[in-house]
Image (spheres, coloured by chain):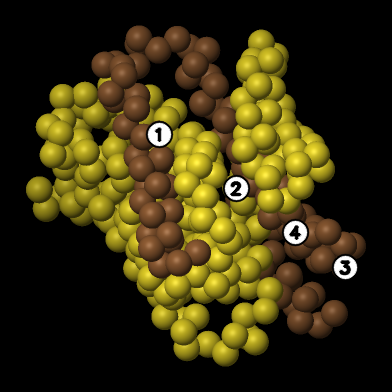
């Protein structure tokens, strides 16, 4: 991408996230007008999207050699998160493990 | 006013730690992905949605596609539609010059730390705006620190540091997993992602995967808590 194309990409992405944030305020006056089923949908969308984003991180792991360090470190990140509920600790531990593996193996 | 700002600062403290850390990671990641130095700063300031920013940086050296960029940012950012729905009544009656920034700067973390405060508290709009502005500042300065760090460090020291994005998504996924009463939604995300990756390949699977998530959530909605 050229600098110009990058700038346009950022503007497009900014417009998209602005639409997601402002749409309810433009369309609805108060939350009572929105059916409960739609509000429930929002509760499930977050966890589902992060499931997809985890898969996204593995999209370029076409071979076993690139797959196993990432899989191992991602599992370690999740284990630390579940054990400590500290995102910072989990990210530090997982990233450190991954960096050790790819630098030593 | 002073006590409101103090209260806002106290509320924002957990976000400060997280945003400086992840923001720095984002600055480093974007540099490693080959993006220009200003790219992570511009996305941090104007897109201000971490997950979307990481994906933008990952695509920064690829081909330009207006449609793909919009669809990706909209679908990955779509959870914010529902944060705003939750804020409709809380922000009602606030003048637009304040409300505009309260809505634009409502990140996952700002949403989480301000939600326990009652909207009926005196000076609520000022408080909400102050927390939002502080959180935004942490994110942008954290990213700036990452960009500067990437410029000074020997690139060979950063081999494998790109894992920070995987770590962030994996940690949030695990945190959601802990908070769920059942894991259908998380599993639908994994399954839709994996299925679409196998069917459509690494360069074209995100949009079919998001559409599959919407369809599966709609189909399963009676069985979800």
Q: Residues at marks 3 and 4, common chain? A: yes
How far, Cα to Cα, is label 2 from label 3? 26 Å
Compare marks 3 and 1 and give the one earlier in the sequence.
Answer: 1
Circle 4 SS class: loop
- Crowding at dot 3, Cα within 10 Å, few <14 / some 14-19 / many 20+, comes out as few
- The mark closer to the camera, 2 or 1, is 1
Q: The chain coloured yellow carries which letter?
A: B
Q: Residue at x 17, y 47 (%)?
A: B4
Percent x, y of residue B32: 57, 74
Q: Which residue is mark 3?
A: A65
Subunit bearing disc 4: A
Mark 4, residues whose alpha carbon is within 10 Å: few (<14), some, or many (≥20)? few
Residue beneath disc 2: B172
Q: Which residue is mark 1?
A: A20
Q: Which image quadrant for residue B139? A: bottom left
Q: Quadrant of the C terminus of chain A?
A: bottom right
Q: Is residue A17 left or right of residue A22?
A: right
Q: Are marks 2 and 3 on the same chain?
A: no
Q: Provide residue B12's location: percent of width, then percent of height.
A: 33, 53
Q: Examine the rendered structure and indicate whether residue B197 appears above or below residue B59.
A: above
Foreground residue among B31 and B137: B31
Q: Chain of mark 3?
A: A
Which chain hosts label 2? B
Q: Color of chain A here? A: brown
Of discs 4 and 2, which sits in the foreground? 4
């Amino acid at each position: 991408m050229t600098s110009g194309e990058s700038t346009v990409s950022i503007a497009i992405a900014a417009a998209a996230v602005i639409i997601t944030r402002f749409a309810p305020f433009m369309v609805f006056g108060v939350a009572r007008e929105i059916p409960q089923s739609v509000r429930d949908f929002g509760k499930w969308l977050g966890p589902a999207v992060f499931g997809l984003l985890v898969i996204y991180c593995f999209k370029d792991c076409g071979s076993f050699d690139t797959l196993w360090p990432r899989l191992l470190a991602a599992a370690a990140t999740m284990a630390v998160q579940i054990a400590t509920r500290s995102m910072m600790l989990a990210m530090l531990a997982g990233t450190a493990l991954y960096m050790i593996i790819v630098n030593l193996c | 006013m002073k006590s409101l700002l103090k209260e806002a600062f106290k509320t924002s403290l957990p976000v400060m730690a997280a945003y400086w850390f992840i923001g720095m990671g984002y600055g480093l990641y974007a540099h490693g992905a080959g993006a220009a130095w200003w790219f992570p700063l511009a996305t941090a300031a104007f897109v201000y949605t971490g997950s979307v920013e990481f994906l933008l940086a990952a695509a920064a050296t690829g081909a330009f596609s207006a449609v793909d960029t919009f669809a990706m940012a909209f679908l990955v950012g779509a959870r914010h539609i529902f944060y705003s729905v939750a804020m409709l009544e809380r922000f009602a009656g606030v003048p637009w010059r304040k409300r505009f920034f309260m809505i634009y700067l409502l990140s996952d973390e700002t949403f989480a730390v301000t939600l326990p405060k009652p909207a009926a508290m005196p000076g609520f709009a000022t408080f909400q705006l102050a927390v939002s502005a502080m959180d935004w500042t942490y994110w942008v300065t954290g990213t700036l620190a990452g960009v500067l760090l990437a410029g000074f460090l020997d690139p060979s020291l950063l081999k494998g540091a790109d894992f920070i994005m995987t770590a962030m998504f994996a940690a949030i996924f695990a945190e959601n997993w802990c908070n769920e009463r059942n894991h259908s939604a998380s599993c639908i995300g994994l399954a839709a992602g994996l299925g679409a990756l196998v069917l459509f390949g690494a360069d074209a699977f995100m949009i079919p995967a998001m559409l599959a998530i919407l369809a599966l959530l709609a189909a399963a909605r009676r069985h979800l808590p």
